[in-house]
Image (cartoon, helix red, strand yellow):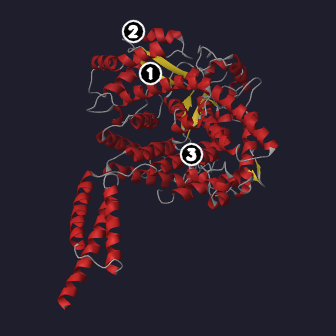
Amino acid sequence: MLIELRRLLLDIWQALARHSFDEGEWSWGAGGGLSSVADAERLLCLLRPATEIAAFRLDDPDTTGPDVARALRNAGDPGEIPRRLVEVLGDFMAKHRGEDGPAFGGGSCFAPQDPARELSEEQRRFGVVDSYSMSVSLCLAVLGFLQVYRGRTRQTSTLIRVDRLRDDTSARLTAAMVGLLRSFTVGVVDHSSAQGRDLIRFLGQGRLSDRQVLRRFRERFTSLRALITESVTLGLDADVRDQLRGDERLFECGWGWSVVEDAPEVTLEPTTAERIGSQPRGVASPVPCLSFTVVALDGIEGLLSERTLVLGLLDAEQQKLAEALRLRWEITRQYWSVVARFHEDAWPLEHLPRHATLQGPEPEYFSLCVASILVHDLMRHRTSDDRLTRVVGVLERLAERGRITSGAPPDDPAVRLHDPGVTMSLPGSEKWGPAMTWRRADFSAQLLKPTVQLCGLSRDAGSQDRLLTLAERILDHLWHRRISEGEGVGLWDDVDAVRPASSGRRGPLLSWSLTRCMTECMVAAHAVHGREPIRSDELSVSARAVISEAAHLFGRELMRQPAPHSPRSVEYRGVDADLRRARQLVDQQPGTAYALALGALARLDALARVQGDGLQGA
């Protein structure tokens, strides 16, 4: 994966361009416009690498690499690609706009719980957290892309389109941020209820009594409870804050699947409120769902990134909304990080549940969501290598239980994680028609992402080697699931390519969700390369010792005072340059410094042997 990263990403782009561009014109296909989520994910497959990896930039035709141009040749030449992207993005904004503002409907991604019933058009128009989060990521990428491209074009018609797209993108970004704020919820749970007992059982792991769990929960979350009740106001029902003021009740926090019922509207400036239109009524029950929480955290992370800050992509009102989302982001990370490590001797996360959990029927997916949030927290706050090593063990076990790194016998229940995927009920949807569900078949890709992220975080060589090995095996599993023929060739997903043959083979189904996940994993892996390599203290000591020995021998050799332009003087200059470079690198790259010093020692020894031979001959 590390060697072929660029080629793998270019392969994805080539397949995307082959599927989406017909003689240079974008083709949405039969599914285009039916779901704001799928359409945004499709565009993110192109925009995320183009805006986060310098070598894949598309906003300046003069800097487009030849291999990038070849991969996207179906879209046109480097000068045509950004112009066509502006047209496609403008089309996306128009397709997913309601009567008075941006729309975030789940559309075809929603499914009825009872296959015999049909969802109403009103239900398919319900906003969903995936759409809010994907729109945040897409809009930030688009604004950064337009910021550069506007200075590279002189065509009046294109400039008009760019300015219109920038306004539409900014409005959609604001609306998506408001949707995320109003989808955040805190579920207050009585410890005697079924959900409360499930949470106590998970936290106690049979090692703590119910009374001990309740006492420790109260101690661990006193400051977080106070922070929620006193600081979280935008989009959160006041009754929830009142229920939290007593410290005897359990609670969970995170995002529901949509705007929660009774969520108050977010107050905006009149001009901004007019641009985004009316704020939709809440439809979701105020129950946090870990799967949607992970998706929301990913989108919010982009708002808080250095890129967003440096480029100044947010206006004043968006900065206020981003600060409110940052607070919820911090609260959620802290909450689930403490839950995952409730007691240090035996983390609840390390004891993967064997049965249904408080968040759904698939314990592996629940554990993966908790692990993903914990990785978010570890990336924000540097931690000990011991904790990182324990998380590595969790990821390895999830890969095994998901039958990614181990064989899957026929009819193995674990195959359901990949096909048909994890089906989640959407509480509250039944009030508006048939009960709705949402399906996720991205277990493998969602496991690959935190594995890659930890590769860049770990400073322990052993843990990093385990992570790299795991990442390679997950990627190998996923790469074999690319579609090999028919629609979407080169994209995802063909589960039948890796699972045992069975009578239930369904054939490949194009999944923009999984394709987008794979693209983001490639971008995350690229970011790992930008970090400094692991520094070994032991190797640093050895490097300094070798440098010291080489410097001493070099000083003795210089006493021979060779002629200024003799071959020996040229060798001396080379040795001197290597030693200077070794001293510069010994703190950050001790391995490189060690190799340079060893090379200098070898050259000095060769010079000494030549000198000795010369003296003997004399």
> Residue type at mark 1?
Glu
Name the mark on residue 252.
1
450 sits left or right of 116 in the view: left
- The residue lying toward the viewer, choosing from 213 and 321, is 321
Amino acid type of the residue tagged 2 in the rendering? Gly
Mark 3 against mark 2, which lies toward the viewer? 3
Element under disc 2 = loop
Locate residue 535 relative to residue 322 in the image: left or right. left
Residue ID at (52%, 51%): 478
| Residue 327 image offset from top left, x and y in percent | 48, 23
Q: Residues within 10 Å of mark 2 (few under 14, many from 20)?
A: few
- Residue 3's disc is none
Is the C-beta separation of discs 3 and 2 under 8 Å? no
Q: Is residue 264 left or right of residue 596?
A: right
Q: Report the residue marked by disc 2.
A: 246
- Helix, strand or loop under label 3: helix
Q: Which residue lies under the disc numbered 3?
A: 52
Does residue 127 show up? no
**First of labels 2, 1 by sequence position:** 2
Q: Residue at x 67, y 31 (%)?
A: 170
Mark 3 closeness class: few <14, some 14–19, many ≥20 residues within 10 Å: some
Q: Residue at x 19, y 86 (%)?
A: 615
Q: Position of residue 454 (x, y in %)?
A: 41, 44
Under circle 1, the secondary element is strand
Along the horizontal axis of the image, is 44 left or right of 195? right
* Displayed quadrant of residue 265: top right
